[in-house]
Amino acid sequence: MYNEKVLKHLIYPFLNKKVILPSPSLQFRFAAVMIIIHFKNRSPYVILIKRTNLVKNHAGEISFPGGNFIENDVNMLETAVREISEELGIKIKKEQVIGHLNAVKTLTSRYIIYPYVALTDRIPEITDINYEVEKIIDVPLIPLLKSRENDLKHQQQFTISQLPRFTYKNEIIWGATARILDQLAKLFSREINF
């Protein structure tokens, strides 16, 4: 059984706490996502979204809510907090954010993504999503992490070994989102027998 305190004790020591400002780059664009871990019946859940076909990059793919760094953002955490509010109407307080995982590069769109982790006992009912979100997928975290397997299709396509993929119901989670989930899986594997 889990709650916010137990989960924070489990993963907090392994998260990065440093404030991140994107460095100028002509090669990459910068984005931030928010991994919102919340609880139902003392089990951790995580919010994923399926992106609509109206977005320029990663249309129809499963991702964490988030988006592009803009000039008005103070740092990458500000980007993640702003984007979650714009996409899902969820207000995350900075004190709910316990750190971030390592940045990942997308395989197809030249983004560097900073994944922040927020813990909250529960999330409000989501009633206001924007045009970028086709649907919200509220996933039990531990079964999702246990679904990890090697993504043979994309390993061959991009000639990169050990690419992970995860599945939930009929949805395949691959690419940067899967590599972020893989980092979480490694943190949880210290306590949970995968």
Image: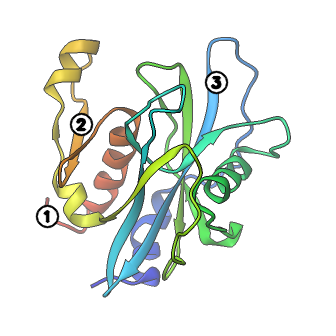
At which x and y percent is residue 94?
70, 66
Q: Which residue is mark 3?
A: 29
Q: Nearer the viewer, residue 141 or 138?
A: 138
Residue at disc 1, secondary structure: loop
The one of 131 and 121 positioned closer to us in this rendering: 131
Residue at the image point whose x is 52% and y is 37% from the top: 103
Q: Comparing marks 3 and 1, which lies closer to the viewer?
A: 3
Q: Give x and y (percent) for residue 74.
A: 82, 46
Task: Count the marks.
Answer: 3
Q: Residues within 10 Å of mark 1 (few under 14, many from 20)?
A: few
Labels 3 and 1 touching (C-beta < 8 A): no
Q: Secondary structure at mark 2?
A: strand
Q: Residues within 10 Å of mark 2 (few under 14, many from 20)?
A: many
For the residue pair 157 and 62, the one nearer the viewer reads as 62
Q: Amino acid at mark 2?
A: Pro
Position of the C terminus by quadrant: bottom left
Give the quadrant of residue 163.
top left
Asked whether disc 1 touches disc 2, contact meaning CB atoms under 8 Å apart, the reply is: no
Q: For residue 93, which numbered disc appears in the image?
A: none
Which residue type does callout 1 highlight? Asn
**Number of the front mark, 1 or 2:** 2
Mark earlier in primary sequence (3, 1): 3
Residue 138 found in image quarter: bottom left
* CA distance for labels 3 and 1: 37 Å
Dot placed on the residue nearer the N-terminal end, 3 or 2: 3
Q: Earlier in the sequence, mark 1 or mark 2?
A: 2
Residue at image coords 69%, 70%: 93
Relative height, residue 89 to residue 16 (above, below): below
Q: Which amino acid is tagged 3?
A: Arg
In the image, which disc is placed on residue 164? Answer: 2
- The residue tagged 1 is 193
Q: Position of residue 101 (x, y in %)?
A: 49, 48
